[in-house]
Amino acid sequence: MTVAQRREPAAGIVAPESRPRRWVLPGVVAAASALVFAVVRPHLVDDTFITLAYARNLAFHGHWGLIAAETSNTATSPLNVLLLAALTLVLRDAVLAAGALFVLCQVALVLALRRAGDRAGLPAWFAPAAIALLTVNPLLLSSIGLEVELGAAGVAWLLVCAAERRPVAAGVLTGLLALVRPDLVVVALVVFVLRRRFWEKAWQSVLAAVAVALPWFAFSWVVLGSAVPDTVIIKTLQKSWGQWDFGNGPGLYAEVFPWATVASFLPVALALAAFALCLVDAARGGPVWARVRPFAPLVPAGIAHYLAYTRLHVPPYHWYYGPSLVAATLFLAAAAAAAVRVPSRVAAAAAVAGVLVISVGGYASGGLPRRFAPLMSNHDATADYERIGPELGRLVGGGTVRSGGEIGVLAYSCGCAIVDLFDDRGAVGPAIAERKARLGALGRAAVDLNFRFFDFGVRPIVTDFALVRGDPPPGALRRWTLTSPWAGTQQLYLVRGNGSGA
């Protein structure tokens, strides 16, 4: 064999690019992602600002809480808050930090996808196509600033480590995913179990995962009063969704945001169809399955995550569907790139292009910049809340005010103490008791263990003012009009006291 022959890549393996060219793709993704964040900044959803408030308080005051006056434990993603706080400390602005973290996660994601695609013998366009499908997905666009993108990057690198048989690295990533969102452990476990000979050196993965995740959960358990955040109680007690919960939630979104819902979940339908075709190909000993096999665990992982959330009967907040959508979309892109026959390639390219056109066209059809995210459940636009916040702060001064149902943007922008279950630990105690009353013996034991160090002696905060929606209350100090495609038009009033009318 000649030297030239030895240097040729094996069949199905993509030749490595030169080092300068290797940075073209992440550079383009970084620039495009920064532009995307600038476009979506006006409609970052209310829950994003809960996270940003936590990050800002941690960065500037060393305080874990939604407001500076109270310690709370309702940040679902501690790793997201910690990373945002570090960036906020440097950039001095939490919103700018959210944009920087989004760009970094996008770059980490595309690097993982390119590495996984190269190993699987997929064409070079796989990683750009996958990142494009994720970036323009209306639901994922509506979740920017939350932990969905951070979780996507973690899952992609977990796939890389699983394929490369790196048990310690896989364990570290599993531990980090638990810190992104505890429910992402479901995805990690499925990916772990479905790898070939998963039991080999499994103990290394388990020990690494525990070593990474345990310190935070132990600190949260003892110091903050609950290992898993208080939102595990708060979200399962919310009653304003009526007959809708996570399991049938897409139907509710389809009623209000039809195009965005279709465009968001279309990759899931296509991925399930592609997965079935790949299984048929595997049964026949075809070439496609061999290329797509490293990505195959994503489909059952996404299904498992969806079923786990359905079992919890939590409200259908749109970002809860993020992990399942990410998993399905990554597999769809891999299956499209793995097509070997010309008709299959044409069909795959048409499917990917169709999803991109529907998503981008639908997003831009309402005009830019958009006031509202493509999918959301807020009662007003972020820009309106950002205008109301400072005015509210001037009106209440040093007093405390009970929220009118949405707290994120107002807490971030008012410079005042605005409270509800998300930052009033005294109100969480009764909520825990209410939740326990609905559970069986095992569930009650789990709740007792999680809140073993919770201080049930803390009294609920007595507020000086309250925000109330609905009919005009007597003695209202101020009124604002809220409007959104989700909730219609409402009036928000500022009153003295706790707003109960007592």
Image (cartoon, rainbow, N blue to C red):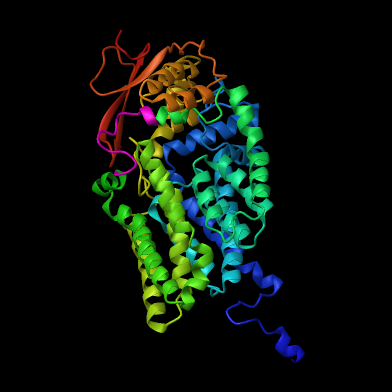
Front residue (pair 273, 24): 273
Residue 478 horizontal/vertical position (percent)? 34, 20
* Left-right relation of 256 to 237: left
Q: Quadrant of residue 431?
A: top left
Q: In this rendering, would 493 be left or right of 157? A: left
Would residue 275 be counted in the magenta stretch?
Answer: no
Looking at the figure, which quarter contains the N terminus?
bottom right
Provide residue 131's location: percent of width, then percent of height. 50, 61
Snapshot quadrant of residue 81? top right
Residue at left 52%, top 72%?
A: 291
Task: Look at the picture and state if 346 lies above or below 475.
Answer: below
Q: Position of residue 245 (x, y in %)?
A: 31, 38
Whether residue 118 is situated above or below residue 148 in the rendered picture:
below
For the C terminus, the quadrant is: top left
Q: Is residue 414 visible?
A: no
In the displayed structure, does residue 346 sit left or right of residue 250?
Answer: right
In percent of width and height, residue 142 lies at 41, 48
Residue found at the far bottom of this picture: 2
> Which picture quadrant has residue 310?
top left
Res 381 visible: yes
Q: Is residue 288 left or right of residue 487?
A: right
Q: At 66% from the left edge and 47% from the top edge, which residue is drawn?
A: 203
Q: Which residues are magenta?
A: 236-248
Does the magenta segment cover residue 242? yes
